Structures are given as C-alpha cells and as structure tokens.
Amino acid sequence: MQIRFSIETATKLVEAKAIAWPMFDPAQARSLEEQDYTMLLKQVLVIQKQIAKEVAQKEFQLHSKHKIPQEWKNWLSTEQIPFFDGDCKDAPCPACAE
C-alpha cells in the first residue's frame, strides 16, 4: 500500500477527500465488503497521521469536500485527527490559506 497526501505545507500534511460519507457509515453497512471499506479508510487515516507525526514531524489534517457525519467527527476527534468539512471556496480552510 502506498500512502500519499493531497497537500503538504511547511507545518502540515493534508488529506483532501470528496468522500461519499454514507457509503462509510457502519450503521448503514449492508455487507461485509462495505464494513471492510470503513475499516480500511480508518486504518489509512491513522497511518497517515502516524507518518505525518513520526516521519515528517508535521500535523495531519483531513479536509472533506462534503459534510462529515457526526459519527465520523466523533471518531476523528477520538483519534486526534483535525478535520474540516464543506466547501473551501466560501471560507478557505487553514491548509488552503497557506
């Protein structure tokens, strides 16, 4: 598995996503395959956070084009992954402003 980041600034690595969040809702998962996608996404985000912190010595952030569901916001907060959601065009996110 190759891990990449969407944006790199002087202080952070950012993963920018246009995720269809309902597809990754564990409560809505109808099959084991859908549950696997949710677990895989969580694993990738945790790995990205570890790489940013331990290898690049930078902060990791998740930026989502679409609104992030509360269940995911809770999980991201528990994992200490800062996140921004919505359209950056109207209110630039910190990574876009740098």
Image (cartoon, grey):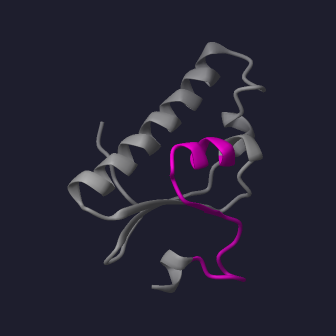
Left or right, residue 4 beside residue 23: left
Q: Nearer the viewer, residue 46 or 18?
A: 46
Q: Nearer the viewer, residue 60 or 22?
A: 60
Outermost top residue? 32
Q: Nearer the viewer, residue 92 or 79?
A: 79
Position of residue 9 relative to residue 78, above or below, is below
Q: Is residue 19 magenta?
A: no
In the rendered view of the protein, which quadrant contains the C terminus? bottom left
Which residue is located at x 72 percent, y 23 percent? 29
Left or right, residue 48 beside residue 31: left
Which residue is located at x 65 percent, y 62 percent? 65
Which residue is located at x 51 percent, y 36 percent? 42
Number of labels in the image equals 0
In the rendered view of the protein, which quadrant contains the N terminus? top left
Asked where in the image residue 12 lies, by quadrant, the reply is: bottom left
Left or right, residue 84 beside residue 90: left
Q: Position of residue 75 (x, y in %)?
A: 62, 41
Position of residue 10 relative to residue 12, above or below, is below
Magenta region, residue range: 73-93
Position of residue 27 relative to residue 98, above or below, is above
Q: Position of residue 45 (x, y in %)?
A: 46, 44
Q: Position of residue 18 (x, y in %)?
A: 62, 56
Which residue is located at x 62 percent, y 22 percent? 35
